[in-house]
Image (cartoon, rainbow, N blue to C red):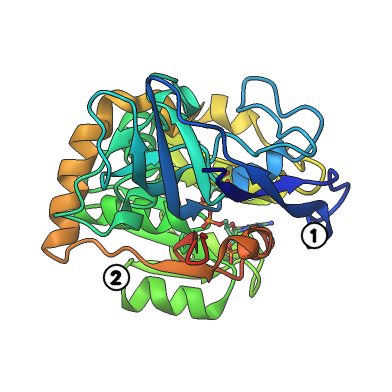
Amino acid sequence: MNLMGRQVQVRSYPQGPVRREHFEVVDVPIDPVGPGEVLVRNTWTSVDPGLRLRLREAAPEGYFVAFPLHAAMDGIMTIGEVVESRAEGFKVGDVVWHALGWRDYAVVDASAVQLSGLGTLRTLDISIAEPQWYLGALGGMGLTAYAGLWVVGALKGGETVWVSAAAGAVGSLAVQIAKLHGNRVVASAGSEDKVRWLLDDLQVDAAFSYRSAEVRTGLKAAAPEGIDVYFDCVGGDHLEAALDGMRRGGRVAICGSISEYESEPAGPRNLFLAVAKDLTIRGFRGSSNLDLLDTMQTELGTALADGRLRQRETVFDGLTSAPDALIEVIAGRTTGKTLVHITDAR
Ligand SMILES: NC(=O)c1ccc[n+]([C@@H]2O[C@H](COP(=O)([O-])OP(=O)(O)OC[C@H]3O[C@@H](n4cnc5c(N)ncnc54)[C@H](OP(=O)(O)O)[C@@H]3O)[C@@H](O)[C@H]2O)c1
């Protein structure tokens, strides 16, 4: 049988904001399944701001590699169902995750290490969770929030924690984890609707929209006594405001710098405050903390099951909507984890 599938490919690299015309959806023949491989029909695929950093000739040094033009976009977390298997330990019907996303069918080498190991083919327990939760709270998003807070933020409880882009995939988990562990949590986001959701549903202690007031002003009003931990998803003016607001001995967990993904870096210009206040500032990758995956899944899985943790999704329907989903997530028009539900696989 000659199976055909569809892939979203990069047609050209954006110079400014990413647009639909930078992508094309291409019909491709699916390779026969070789020894040690499985054929997966993808059902859910992830949409992450970090993909924007790979839409260029060279991605930032040390990061995941750039997407080549006119080729499959490898290295995007995806959920699917095994439809053919020649790999030990995987059988037809298994629900798996792997990293060959933004396509409807993928032939996956079960032994290939993908996305630093996070995206290596793995069977998922869907008796305890919806499959797509493994792209959110029980996957890379959960791991990033968990590792950033515990390993870098060195959570202690009883402190003040600020999370930026707090209504997004990672941020909405970070605020809840920090809250569950007895901290005062301040959240910021880009709209009053998101602020309401953070206050009413996620029960953060204070929240502000950086679009309604200058970030420093919003932070000062939300945390007049200062902050001990800053979970940074934004960089630029947010990081600068955090340095101003940090208390002595504070920790800054740099998770991402989305304010710079489509424009020039903008600071911080007040780094000396790290010296003055004995701060620890550290970047980190969720995928560099794979040793925490099982613990994170157990802890967050339990909290999801008993309702202490909420996972919200913005779902785009059909593979061809993936570029739109990326545009929307960067523009801040999504809430929670942004996903594409591949309902249209042939
Ligand atoms: N270190 C890691 O391993 C790792 C893993 C996953 C993600 N990340 C990073 O974590 C951050 C969040 O990722 P995510 O997947 O959870 O995405 P997300 O938060 O669901 O979506 C990104 C959000 O960033 C906000 N944003 C966009 N431009 C902004 C700007 N100029 N200033 C302030 N906020 C802006 C938007 O929300 P608003 O409405 O609030 O503006 C948007 O919804 C990103 O920086 C990402 O690269 C890092």
139 displayed left or right of 93: right
Position in image of residue 135 (x %, y %): 39, 50
Label 1 crowd bin: few (<14), some (14–19), many (20+), radius 10 Å: few
> In which quarter of the view is residue 52 placed?
top right
| Residue 313 seen in the current view | yes
Q: Which residue is located at x 55 percent, y 34 percent?
A: 75
As shown in the figure, which amino acid type bears the numbered disc 2? Gln
**Label 1 beta carbon within 8 A of ligand 1:** no
Label 2 crowd bin: few (<14), some (14–19), many (20+), radius 10 Å: some
Residue identified by numbered label 1: 19
Position in image of residue 286 (x %, y %): 42, 33
> Is label 2 in a helix, a strand or a loop?
loop
Disc number placed over residue 219 in the picture, else none: none
Position in image of residue 251 (x %, y %): 42, 34
Q: Check the image and name the residue furthest to the right.
A: 15
Position in image of residue 65 (x %, y %): 66, 26
> Is label 1 in a helix, a strand or a loop?
loop
Residue identified by numbered label 2: 203
Q: Which residue is located at x 16 percent, y 45 percent?
A: 299
As shown in the figure, which amino acid type bears the numbered disc 1? Arg
Q: CA distance from mark 2 to mark 1?
A: 35 Å
